[in-house]
Image (cartoon, rainbow, N blue to C red):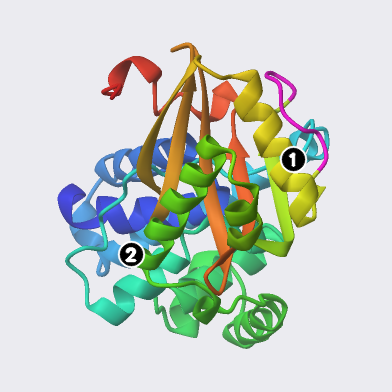
Amino acid sequence: MYEKYRKPLFSLAYRMTGSVMDAEDIVQEAFVAYGQLPDPGDIRNERAFLYKIVTNRCLDLLRSSARQRELYVGPWLPEPLMDDASAASEDPSEAYMRRESLSTAYLLLLQQLGAVERAVFLLREIFGYAYDEIAGMVGKSEANCRQIYRRARGSIHYDPSRSPAVDVADRQIKRFVGALAQGDTGTLLELLSDNVVFLSDGGGKVMAAQKPVAGVRAVAQLLQNLLRMYEGKFTLSFHNVNGLPGIRLVVEERLQYIYSFDFAGEQIGNIYAIANPDKLKHVPIEDRDLP
């Protein structure tokens, strides 16, 4: 049962919380709770029971951490999910939607929803539950869940057609890195959208911009300055980050930045850099193969 449900339960918890570590803990708690039932055989639908536990654990966590989020230093970004290939065996159209719904841009849109709205939306939109099942999971009426879903659906403005195919995105990101390394400002300006935004999450613990940097020239200048600052001190590698091509930058084998990207057509529309060490405990530097 653990092998059957672990990945989809983690997928829900991660989308709900934006935290790899919290999602892993919540899934473990769900299976422990199931194992402690006096008679698990009385559960007619073990899948729905586990999803209900995970959903409610996520709601509890989000309510308890709301104040902490308000006091967060600088932009908040979800913990990166590295090299996730869990969708490889799915139906191609379903795998595409699941990959897009793991992207940093999509997860940030989910953060605009209230906790219950997020749960109802995900259970319906991504995991395909019926409204009567969702009602039992979140403690609302079926009619209320329909209303919540419609409201949430109307506020999530995400167009996956803006994103290029994965191989195109991968090629563009490698061109982007090459242009930075060569000081090719012309190519850099070509690859970045005029309205590109750079968000950096250091959580007040490492050096990072505490406000978004917007505009193609401002972002290009910032990136070129960072490259000069760390010249000869960093190692860069390419990875899947949240289901899409991304970058891992390790500075002097002690500080790391995980970059993910959002595209506007074939241009980079947003750049997300996560450096808060508390959010990168699940990707320790010593476990990686430095090229």
Is the magenta region chiefly helix, strand or loop?
A: loop
How far from the left and from the top, in percent, is residue 8? 32, 59
Decide: is 183 above or below 140: above
Decide: is 113 above or below 10: below
Judge from the rendering whether residue 243 lies leftward or rightward of residue 91; answer left or right. right
Q: Which residue is mark 2?
A: 167
Decide: is 284 above or below 15: above
How far from the left and from the top, in percent, is residue 218? 80, 46
Spatial separation of the CA atoms under disc 2 and disc 1: 27 Å
- Along the viewing direction, whichever of 229 and 96 lies nearer the viewer: 229
Q: Which residue is mark 1?
A: 221
How far from the left and from the top, in percent, is residue 87? 26, 63
Q: SS of the residue at dot 1?
A: helix
In the image, the segment drawn in magenta is: 204-211
Q: Residues within 10 Å of mark 1 (few under 14, many from 20)?
A: few
How far from the left and from the top, in percent, is residue 167? 33, 64
Quadrant in the picture for residue 202: top right
Number of numbered discs overlaid on the protein picture: 2
Judge from the rendering whether residue 46 lies leftward or rightward of residue 180; answer left or right. left
Q: Quadrant of the C terminus?
A: top left
* Disc nearer the start of the sequence (2/1): 2
